[in-house]
Image (cartoon, helix red, strand yellow):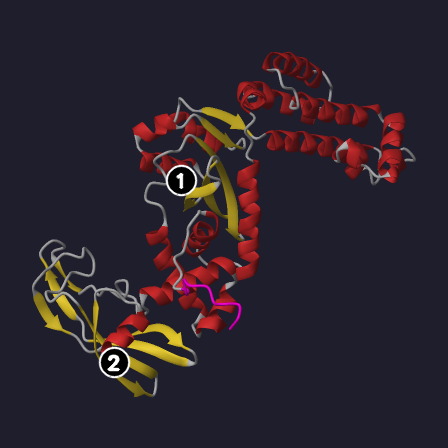
Amino acid sequence: MRITTIFKRLLGVERTIVTGMAFEAVGFIIDVKPRWKKPRCGICNKKGPIYDTQQPRLWRHLSFGRCRIWLRYTPRRVQCPYCGAVHVEAVPWALHASRFTRDFENMVTWQAQRSDKTTVQHLMGLNWRTVGRIIGRVVPLLRDKKRLDELYVIGVDEISYRKNHKYVTLVMDHIKRHIVWAREGKNADTLKAFFDELGPDRCRQITIITMDMSQAFIKAVREKAPTAQIIFDRFHVQQLTNNAVDDVRRSIMQELAGTDESQFIKSSRWALLKNPWNLSRKQRAKLRDVQRENKRLYRAYLLKEELARIMDYLQPKRAMAAMMEWLSWASRSKLRPFVKLARTIRKYKDDILAYIKLRYTNGPTEALNNKARLIQRKAYGFHSANSFIAMMMLCCGGIDVDAPLPNQPVSTHI
């Protein structure tokens, strides 16, 4: 077997001919060339006439132990009749405009999916920013091209990727539990861009959309997917009641500041907001003090617990009847935060109670947000939305990276 054939098999690069090799200061250099004779455009991969020839280039390949491997080739430029411009020719071992081979970039991406960028930087001997550029180049190619074809139940949420209100809007497939779409921003136009990408036919396929009560998201869904059933996340609704209880507590504390009665309300926040079964002995005692000393605050607590109980109903008709009673109680409770909250819930009660029948929440989307926070902590933040989106799609988008790893298991006797 010829030495060039041996190195071709070791490289594992298809449609490539090995023409020579040499040891130089940068490492072991293998001279290669594409198997096809007529060059192809690096953008559209169509054949075209040669425009001129450039200087020799090096592409870094996976190392052999401690020895770095480089592929060397003198690329040609193509006068592409389809693109109408001059582009560097395509090569089978690397992506266009990249100085790394496909196997090398796949290995970097596979490691970044399981580790932080700093670790990948040291393992592969790269610059930290280069790792991010490789991920941004590889992830769009690995995403499932049909990920938007069979969307029936989706969740919409936003997450901040940087300070000063820098947000990214995420769309998750509830069935596959994968993020299928992401874009910078959190306004109505951002979500409309998702529906525009889907098109009218695929928008009509969507039957359920879970989200919070963002007016921007509501506007986009009503306009672009009017046939979909909106389900407002039950935990977001209960968070609104928690905020209302906290507003009542703060206003009463301001009224009673400096009096003996304020001592019974002081440090009662978590006793009022936590679930009854999670209260400590001290918190249960504090809740009894509130019940005895301040009826208004205890009324706010009962309103919160009653709405949580309604959301646990299994029969939609019973839930609707209980919700109407709760709205009447909240509206005449003489507690301004709950009067305001009752107007909001009355406006969206059908979409809130849709949870009772369909049992979908935005919980899986929120769980992916926790993964996003972990990704942010591992990277110590992101400077751009594109880098954050690429890492989110890599780690939470159901992408399977084909890393160039040995396929045959090693014998346990060796």
User: What segment carries the magenta color?
Assistant: 405-414
Which residue is situated farthest in the left direction here? 49
Which mark, by number, is residue 71? Answer: none
* Residue drawn at the location 40% of the way across and 23% of the way down: 226
Does the magenta-highlighted stretch encompass residue 411?
Answer: yes
Instruction: State the separation of the CA atoms marked 1 and 2.
Output: 56 Å
Q: Position of residue 325 (x, y in %)?
A: 68, 13
- Answer with the quarter of the image where residue 10 lies: bottom left
* SS class, disc 2: helix
> Which SS does the magenta portion mostly show?
loop
Q: Nearer the viewer, residue 20 or 231?
A: 20
Residue annotated with mark 1: 190
* Mark in the foreground, 1 or 2: 2
* SS class, disc 1: helix
Say above or below: 94 vs 151: below
Amino acid on which the number 1 mark rests in the picture: Thr
Q: Would residue 382 be seen by someone viewing this image from the given angle?
A: no
Mark positioned earlier in the residue sequence (1 or 2): 2
* Residue drawn at the location 40% of the way across and 56% of the way down: 401
Q: Nearer the viewer, residue 330 or 193?
A: 193
141 lies left or right of 53: right
Residue annotated with mark 2: 3
257 lies left or right of 225: right
Say above or below: 134 vs 176: below
- In the rendered image, which quarter contains the N terminus? bottom left
Q: Would residue 209 be seen by someone viewing this image from the given angle?
A: yes
* Residue drawn at the location 67% of the way across and 29% of the way down: 241
* Residue drawn at the location 52% of the way across and 26% of the way down: 231
Q: Nearer the viewer, residue 158 or 70?
A: 70
